[in-house]
Image (cartoon, grey):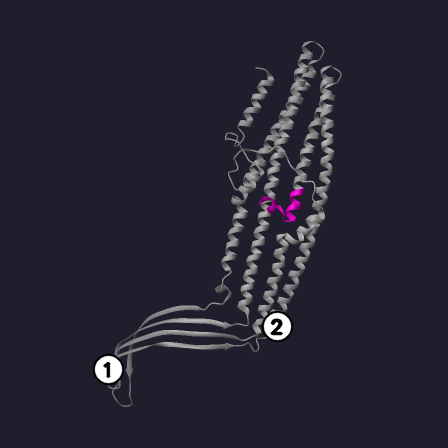
Amino acid sequence: MSLLKSTALLLFGIALHLPGSAQAQDKLTLEQAIQFGLQHNYDIRIVTKEQKINENNVTLGNAGFLPSVDARYTRDFAKNDIRNQFENNEPRIVDNSTTRGSNGSVLLSWTLFDGGRMFINHNRLQALERSGAFFNKATIETAVADIITAYHDVVRNARKINSIEDAIAISEQRVNITQEQFNVGVSAKVEILRAQVDYNADRAELLRQLELLQNSKINLNQLLGRDPNIDFLVDNIIEVTNDLKLATVNEQLLSSNPLLQRLRLNRDIALYDLRSTRALRLPEVGLAASYGRNRSLQDPVIFGNTVGTNESTRQGFNYGLTISMPIFNGLEINRQVQNSRIAVEANTLALQREQNALQSDMSRAYTRYQNRLQLLELEESNLILAKQNAEIAMERYRLGLLTAIELREAQRNQLVAETRLIDIQFEAKVAETELKRIGSTLLNEVN
């Protein structure tokens, strides 16, 4: 068996033993990855559960509109020694007098007016629910952006393997040509050795790239919330949108970015807190009512000169209104109102700061996006030239008009050009994805 065939079998065996290679490699498209991630990504699943809590909190009872009703029952026992002394008469003594009592009641408490705080609190709970929904959206958009980036990282590493395999094929041709030239006496043994060294270097680079590909697949599987060793095939192209405009994405940022919308709601929540604090100055009116039954049995007990059993039962309704109004509490309400005003101002500043930061991120991302588009055009031209140069170099080497070093340089230039083009395509896609994430348009494309 020849050296080249042995090497090919060795590489094939190594590839088969990579994690997940023994499993069937199904095709995974970008759309399938996103849809699977929306259902199984752990961050999305966790934030969805948290949003359900926010939804459950928006009730009239949690806002304070509804009354509270409690039932109580007590049962008690007592045992005492009783001694009654009336002036000069003989004392009346009762040992082990036992008292048994039971008390059952139903209590109703209802705040009829609390200065409007219950209405404010209900609006606040609704705002918190919407705020949670925006946080949920931001988490989903970030997860989708990560999935898109991870998917195209797999595409990038897979395409680099194809480029390295092409380089290995060229190196193999060089080894064969050098061997034929040596056989006919027009080449030295050192040329064969140099060709085999370069060939082995390409094989080593392939092994390193196989490792990078496997790691990128593991990263994508992790984002999809599935077994990291599942193997799959991906598309072979990286499609980059080249017509995004800064004015358009910036407008989308101001109107659709969930983080800005959440901060606007936080400012509204701070305003609700201010109104609720001011309402503490108003009176509070409540209704209290109860129905109860009390029963007591004492045996024995002294009634004048008689010792007997005393049984008492009482049942009925109790009801009434309570009105309370703060007169003076150490100026605590004033302090709380001042702090609430400061919180409103702080939330307004936080909104302005985040808007400025996001617009800065947008400008940087757009500059990077535009730069990558220009580099993409340049590298596409460079690759065409590098391929032509490598083809010419190989023909000249066959004819003995080019040295091995010059052929190797042309071969490496082609590989470097292909690698640069793949990297620029990936970087352009990442920049495009980041622009769409900040502008909150990723989910529109998914849906």
Q: Residue furthest bottom?
A: 88
Q: Can residue 201 be seen at all in this image of the molecule? A: no
Image x and y of residue 340, in percent: 62, 66
Where is mark 1, residue-wise?
307
Nearer to me, 172 or 304? 172
Q: Is residue 189 magenta?
A: no
Question: In the picture, residue 433 is in which quadrant?
Answer: top right
- The residue that appears at 33% across and 75% down in the rendered structure is 294
Q: Which amino acid does the dot numbered 1 rest on?
A: Val
Residue drawn at point x = 59 percent, y = 38 percent? 151
Q: Could you say where residue 380 lies in the image, as x and y percent from the top left?
A: 71, 32
Q: Which residues are magenta?
A: 431-447
Query: Residue 384: x, y in percent?
Result: 72, 28
Disc 2 designates what residue? 334
Magenta-span inclusion, residue 444: yes
Above/below status of 267 relative to 385 = below
- Residue 99, by quadrant, is bottom left
What's the residue type where badge 2 is placed?
A: Asn
Look at the numbered disc 1 and give the secondary structure of its residue: strand
